[in-house]
Image (spheres, rainbow, N blue to C red):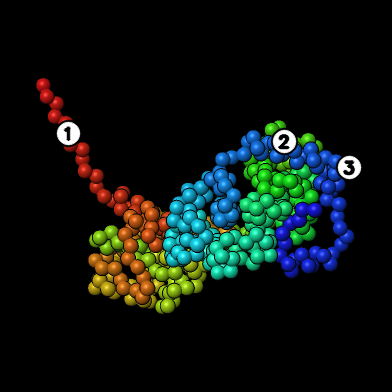
Amino acid sequence: MPRAIHNKDKSDARRKGSRAPQPEKEILGDGGAQSVPSLRQRLLEWFHKYQRDLPWRRNKDPYRIWLSEIMLQQTRVAAVIPFYERFLEHFPTIRALAAAPEAEVLRLWAGLGYYSRARNLQRAAKEIVDKHGGEFPRSAEHALALPGIGSYTAAAILSIAFGARHAVLDGNVARVIARLRAVHGDLREGARWQALQTAADALLDPGAPSDWNQAMMELGAMICTPKSPQCPPCPIAEFCRARQLGLTETIPEKRIKRATEEVELAAAVFLDAKGRTLLLPPPETDREHVTQDEVRPLISKMWHFPMIAVQRDAARELTEFLNSFDALSVNGSKPKLEELRSARHAVTYRAIQLRPFRLAVEKLPKIAGAKAVLLGDLVSRSKVAVSNLTRKIGQSAASHIEDATPRRPRPQRRIQH
């Protein structure tokens, strides 16, 4: 029987639970077990005909599959592809990734967000080199022991790269199964998620686990979408209880989300005559503790502008913050804070308003660990690792400079008579 991958402590707890389920009957109702081979055949035929041509599907290299799975977490396919290809150009192998400076890894990840993924990816690469000879481990136990790899990611890599019989369960697959079974309630609730995993185990085609898992994910991404599922072209529509009951628009039910928290950040964009600006170091290397505690969770442990979480008066509070480490005294007369165009940013449940202030200076202030970078480079492709939040602040400053620069009149063409 194919099996899913579970973390040991969770699987031990489940073994002490209730009697073994009958998953095929649960999924498809009466006669379900007899219908599973037909469902498998139709879905695989559809996948072989209509699957997208994605770069990580062109070979079975476990490193490339692993990288794609990590990048695709919380990120759309179209957004991932250019990052994926550029990352592989710089780090074509696990050994290359393991040996790279962390700052370079983060720089190439910048723009994808959720930067702990990149850090865990490199930590895992180093463990693979140290403990597994640079080859991705084939056992579930060893894969799950790597940083950043959980049940879903391990199942995906081992099944797609090595043909191991592990059923994946991510949001797309869970939605497909929930509609097949007309499952109500929050799919991420512990017992319900385990029931969905049991169903995924039962449906997995033991003869083609790689294609099957990809087909289920592809169906959820392209046909059985969260809103307005395309039921007419669905290859397994006749097996879908939600469709039979008219519930495809209401299953799965919406999760109760955490209330959005509004945050306002004011940032200082120093700018000297050479077009350079000043960035503070990642908080973990910030020996002077310049970065505010309220700001640290929002900047992804990367290089960032001096900034504060605003309480009431952005300009006054930012000035007090800069004065606290003598950032305004280096040029004799204190520079004037010029407020720029604001921007919006989101980090998990936080909705952030970014309020950049430009400070024109002759010399950039000297702050322990800080770095001077060209503002233009920061906006286009930074040589240091910055988050999207920092890049948006830089873009606001750069666009202000463009707007303020007078355009030269076009020369008049003389008309000869």
Image location (x, y in percent) of residue 229: 68, 39
User: The residue under label 2 is which amino acid type?
Assistant: Pro
The residue lying toward the viewer, choosing from 93 and 311, is 93
Q: Is residue 154 left or right of residue 357?
A: right
The residue at which mark 3 appears reads as 30
- Measuring 59% from the left and 66% from the top, which residue is drawn there? 132
- Measuring 33% from the left and 58% from the top, which residue is drawn there? 375
Q: Is residue 40 left or right of residue 222?
A: right
Label whose residue precedes the other's in the sequence (2 or 1): 2
Count of numbered marks:
3
The residue lying toward the viewer, choosing from 163 and 179, is 163
Q: Which quarter of the picture shows residue 180?
A: top right
Q: Secondary structure at mark 1?
A: loop
Q: Secondary structure at mark 3?
A: loop
Q: CA distance from mark 2 to mark 1?
A: 65 Å
The residue at which mark 2 appears reads as 235
Q: Secondary structure at mark 2?
A: loop
The residue lying toward the viewer, choosing from 173 and 329, is 173
User: The residue under label 1 is which amino acid type?
Assistant: Gln
Q: Is residue 171 visible?
A: no
The residue at which mark 1 appears reads as 412
Q: Which mark is residue 101?
A: none
